[in-house]
Amino acid sequence: MDGLDPISYVETTFGIALKKVGRDEWAGPCPWCGGNDRFHVWERGNYWCRPGPGHCGAEGWVDKLAGKDAPTAEQRLEWRVAKLERQHQEHEQRLSRLEEMARCKDHIRYHEALTDEAREYWWSEGITDESIERYLLGWCPRCPTYPESPSYTIPITRHDVLQNIRHRLQRPNGSGKYRPHRAGLGNSLYLADLLDEPRESIIVTEGEKKAIVSTQSGFPAVGVCGKRSFKREWIPLFDSVQVVYIALDPDATESAFRLGALFNGRARVARLPAKLDDMIVRFGANSDDIEAYLRTARPVKVG
């Protein structure tokens, strides 16, 4: 490698720029299949193209790359065309699934099937009868994507159009408590209709139940289904909001600040001692307590 370290060698040989993403890990476009950050190189000398659709999956040691040429312009063009065709096909399939979901009435059936036991579950989570009715919360005897367990159901809608149903499993199998009604539809922002009118502030929290509990307690909130599930395409929905409070779970501080940076100086990160719904339901936090935590939320620096 002519005395070059592995990072410099890869950048010099293939004309790509790598960005440091870990203590001894760098990432950038793959020399052979492109992308943005799928190609990882470690300072000890190994490399790996992260697997995924259209990824070449190459891996090995940098010192074995001598004489290995980058793809030709013709090869890159073929890969770009194949990628665009695959993306178009995936887009058409997703649109078809969304259209089917919009016609689905299962959430109504699940709401009407609520048993006394299921209502007690929602009550135990701090959710009132009014919210159960408003958000059409329900119960399903067999989760469609995990039939081994009944589930508590949360319809995800936008302007009264069903986008998916979140199933909270009664008997999780160890690989997660939640399942979608139909796979392949992607994530949706819960209670996004709250963003249709100008607001002084809104809370972004982690999970649909937290969004419900916060909103019914007088603090309007939208929910994401995981600390890294927020989509940049949702940012314009917040245009009429003056301040965005990020209130993820206590173990997600880094993700909270990363999310807050997307809002161009309008975001504040609330450092909560417990999960937002637990603070209200388990520990009895009142409006004054929540307002105090929001007042001390840390602004997210821009740039």
Image: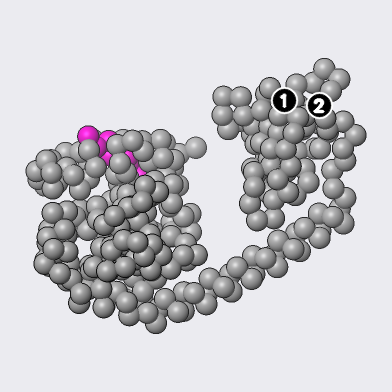
Q: Earlier in the sequence, mark 1 or mark 2?
A: 1
Can residue 244 be spotted in the picture? Answer: no
Q: What residue do we see at 82% from left, 30% from top?
A: 64
Q: What residue do we see at 17% from left, 53% from top?
A: 125
Name of the residue lying farthest toward the bottom: 103
State which region is magenta: 263-273
Q: Give percent across and percent down for residue 101.
A: 42, 76
100 over 65 or under it: above or below: below
| Label 1 packing within 10 angstroms: few (<14), some (14-19), many (20+) | some
Give the labeled residue for mark 1: 45
Magenta stretch encompasses residue 270: yes
Q: How many callouts does the rendering have?
A: 2
Q: Is residue 7 left or right of residue 258?
A: right
Observer-nearest of 121 and 261: 121
Q: How is the image coloured?
A: one colour
Point out which mark residue 63 bears: 2
Q: What residue do we see at 35% from left, 61% from top?
A: 148
Observer-nearest of 181 and 37: 181
Q: What residue do we see at 78% from left, 46% from top?
A: 32
User: What element does badge 2 sit on?
Assistant: helix
User: What element does badge 1 sit on?
Assistant: loop
Magenta stretch encompasses residue 276: no
Indicate the amino acid at tag 2.
Asp
Q: Give percent across and percent down for residue 38.
A: 65, 44
Q: Give percent across and percent down for residue 40.
A: 66, 36
Indicate the amino acid at tag 1.
Gly
| Label 2 packing within 10 angstroms: few (<14), some (14-19), many (20+) | few
Q: Give percent across and percent down for residue 118.
A: 17, 64
